[in-house]
Image (tube, rainbow, N blue to C red):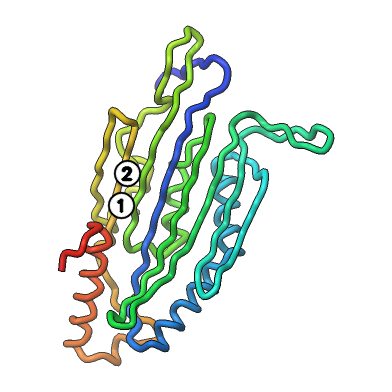
Amino acid sequence: MAEKITLYGFNNLTKSLSFNIYDVCYAKSPREQKDYISYINEQYNSERLTKILMHLTEMIGAHVLSLSKQDYKPQGASVTLMIAEETMIPASDTVVAHLDKSHVTVHTYPEYHPESCLATFRVDIDVATCGKITPLSTLDYLIGSFDSDIITMDYRVRGFTRDVTGKKLFMDHPMTSIQNYIDPKTLLRYDAIDINVYEANLFHTKMLIKDIDLQNYLFNTDVYELPPKERLSIMSRLRREMIEIFSGRNIY
């Protein structure tokens, strides 16, 4: 085990994790597309998202300072938590916390296009922490909390702290890849690539689900109701949609 570094004063390194997931669904008719959006709005409303973020906060050992949540019409929801690492100390009508205040936010973006028969659900989660807390330990929980077909993650360490000799430290933990913080069993289900800029303490990982079980991607439709040729066509459209989202460009 690496020897722990003794710091001078407060560790003011800021560690930011941006986590984005996409869920893709085939909804053929306009009615099915609208029903899918309604289903997503119900399953991932602000109340459910708040529970996910509250559990995430517990996992990293932080305390909630304030909470804001909102559901939107016709679709989508947002939740924001202000958090702190140390226990809060009441002082008259204010709350005094260590200078390690951080935040956790989540936004959802359900969408569909009537011409494509495909609907997507995007979740953006941002975790910014100061001090000893690192959000990387929550990745398995976040991946498991949503139907994750495509996942993009960015991790960045900003600022610096100092050791007792006054030497500046721009990183306080070893880091080579975001994938090192994800369960190997989870990684087996995905194709994953890294784009890292080590000199800037910037790490980027993208993941694409390997196997598609068509039944899981049909909304209000049984796979056995479809002729084989149509199944193959839908599978092809789903895979093409995922590849374009994964690559971030219109390929087909």
Secondary structure under tag 1 reads helix
Q: Residue furthest front?
A: 73
* Residue sitting nearer the eye, 249 or 6: 249
Give me the residue at 61% from left, 44% from top.
Answer: 82
Say if mark 1 contacts mark 2, CB within 8 Å. Answer: yes
* Residue identified by numbered label 2: 179
Q: Residue furthest right?
A: 92
Secondary structure at numbered mark 2: helix
Q: Quadrant of residue 204?
A: top left
**Amino acid type of the residue tagged 1 in the rendering:** Leu
The answer for how far apart the CA atoms under marks 1 and 2 are is 8 Å
Relative to 224, say whether 100 is above or below: above
Quarter holding the C terminus is bottom left
How far across and how far down the image is residue 201, in percent? 34, 31
**x, y percentage for residue 124?**
44, 56
Residue 165 x, y percent position in the rendering? 47, 7
Q: How many marks?
A: 2
Q: Residues within 10 Å of mark 1 (few under 14, many from 20)?
A: some
Relative horizontal placement of residue 204, taking residue 143 as reference (left or right): left
Q: Position of residue 115 (x, y in %)?
A: 29, 82
The kind of residue on which mark 2 rests is Gln
In the current view of this chain or complex, which residue is farthest to the top? 165
- Note whether residue 236 is visible: yes
Q: Residue at x 56, y 69 (%)?
A: 72
**Residue count near mark 2 (Cα–Cα under 10 Å), binned few <14, some 14–19, many ≥20:** many
Q: Which mark is residue 187?
A: 1
- Residue 216 seen: no
Residue 64 falls left or right of residue 241: right
User: Left or right of 92: which side holds 205?
Assistant: left
